[in-house]
Amino acid sequence: MAGVVWPAALLKLEFGTMFNKPIAVVWWPAPLQQLSFGDSFNQSIAGVMWPASLLKLDLGNLFTKPIAEVVWPASLQQLSLGYSFNQPIVGVVWPAALLKLDLGTMLNEPIAGVVWSASLQQVLFGNDLKRSIVGLVWPASLLKLDLGRRFNQPVAGVVWPASLLQLSLGLSFNQPFVGAVWASSRQKLSFGYYYNQDVVGVLDLGREFNQPVAEVMWPTSLQQLSFGYYFDQPIFGVVRPASLQQLSFGYYFNQPIAEVVWPTSLLKLDLGSMFNNPIDGVVWPKSLQQLGERSTTTPPE
């Protein structure tokens, strides 16, 4: 690889599935912006001299090498560590311009003490994170946080960044919400040339969640709230944010709704396949446009 002469104007380079050669002495083309490795790549990247223009780096599904000593290009905005990665990330110096960090499917290393890039907007964990997040200091710029499919740790006491707009707690989450203090942010962002809409505040509670919600303080900007497959708790007396537009209950939900006070802005309500309570006397919100059943016959995987 050391003797390869790349096209001088190359912007994007993808290595194939079988590539697994050392890259420590590769001279990359100066304008390279996107670099992806295939499913077999598992070489050390400590000491690699990355192109100064690199924006996106995908290390492939089998990458398992330590990254504590890696010097990332300052320009890097998106980093994906791949399916198999499960190395320490405490002490890693992330790129200063990083916007999106995908930590891979198998990561379950300690995260207390991680110093995130101040610019970071998205952090994605995979299937195996089982670490406490109480006491973690998230970047103030964070917009989206996905804690992975098997995350099931307490969230009471977690300090969320004020900027957070999307939070995914995963399929396995089933912890009390009472005492949790949510971010109350709502921002207007521009995505692309013409798009200039309010960003939706979304909260998906996952498949396993089945905890009381009567005393939960929801994010004041929340627009979409989805309860998972197994949720079946009373909702009378629950105070939902006035901003809520979409509310979905899962397969097993079957609680009385006759005296429920719905948000006045609600547009869509799904009551779940097992719902079989009287609706005589229910005072529907005048704003409601869609009322029905979220038909899920088997638990999501």
Image: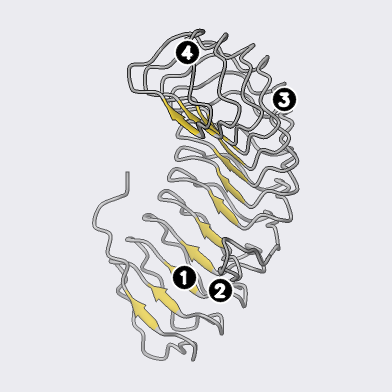
143 left or right, relative to 106: right
Q: Which residue is mark 1?
A: 247
Residue at left offset 59%, top offset 65%: 199
Indicate the quadrant where residue 74 lies: top right
Q: Are marks 1 and 2 in contact (CB under 8 Å)?
A: yes
Sequence-first tag of 3 and 2: 3
Question: How far apart are the two marked residues, 4 and 1, measured between alpha carbons?
Answer: 56 Å
Q: Which residue is mark 4?
A: 4
Amino acid tagged 1:
Leu
Residue 159 in the image, given as x and y percentages of width and height: 73, 47
Question: How far apart are the two marked residues, 3 and 4, measured between alpha carbons?
Answer: 29 Å
Q: SS of the residue at dot 3?
A: loop
Q: Which residue is mark 3?
A: 93
Q: Nearer the viewer, residue 276 or 76?
A: 76
Q: Which residue is mark 2?
A: 244
Residue 256 in view here: no
Question: How far apart are the two marked residues, 3 and 2, measured between alpha carbons?
Answer: 39 Å
Q: SS of the residue at dot 4?
A: loop
